[in-house]
Image (cartoon, rainbow, N blue to C red):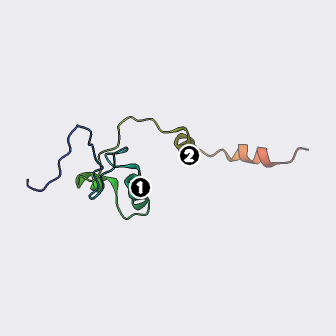
Amino acid sequence: MENEPTQSSEPTKECLMPACDREPEIRGICTQCYQSTSRMVRNGKANWPELEARGLVLPAAPGKPPTPARQAIEDLTAPGPIDHQADHQATEPSR
């Protein structure tokens, strides 16, 4: 199909964002474009799958381990059983 973006497995030499000629760092875009794009995704103004489909970013690297900070956040926010008994024991004064 004409005018459809294509993604090659070769690393790009310039940021994929239009009018940006900086060196890509993450997902085929430079650090500055990644920061602004991430902000737009967090605010619901864009989403990664659509940006990938339009050829503006590359897919996320598969299997890349989370940073220690990200892992700590995931551990703290992971759903799991809540032990109310342990919570009460920790807050009850000793007799």
Q: Residue at x 27, y 39 (%)?
A: 11
In the image, is residue 55 above or below residue 61?
below
Q: Are marks 2 and 1 in contact (CB under 8 Å)?
A: no
Name the secondary structure under disc 1.
Answer: helix
Rendered location of residue 89, percent (x, y): 78, 44
Residue nearest the observer in this picture, 13 or 69? 13
Residue type (three-letter) at the residue carrying disc 1: Ser
Please name whichever residue, 36 or 92, is drawn nearer the observer in this view of the structure: 36
Is 3 placed left or right of 92 in the picture?
Answer: left
Q: Residue at x 35, y 61 (%)?
A: 46
Mark 2 secondary-structure assignment: helix
Residue located 35% across and 39% down the image: 61
Q: Which mark is residue 19?
A: none
Taking the view exactly as shown, the residue that stands out farthest to the left is 1
Q: Which quadrant does the C terminus fall into?
A: top right
Q: Which mark is residue 73?
A: 2
Please state which of residues 8 and 81 is positioned toward the viewer in this rendering: 8
Count neighbours of disc 2 (C-alpha within 10 A) and say few if under 14, some if 14 to 19, many if 20 or more: few
Percent x, y of residue 22: 33, 50
Amino acid type, callout 2:
Ile
- Indicate left or right for 90 with 1 as reference: right
**Residue found at the very far right of the displayed protein:** 95
- Packing grade of label 1 (10 A; few <14, some 14-19, many >=20) is some
Rendered position, 2 above or below 94? below
Indicate the position of residue 2 as horizontal and vertical percent values.
Answer: 8, 55
Q: Which residue is mark 1?
A: 38
Q: Quadrant of residue 94?
A: top right
- 2 or 1: tag closer to the N-terminus: 1
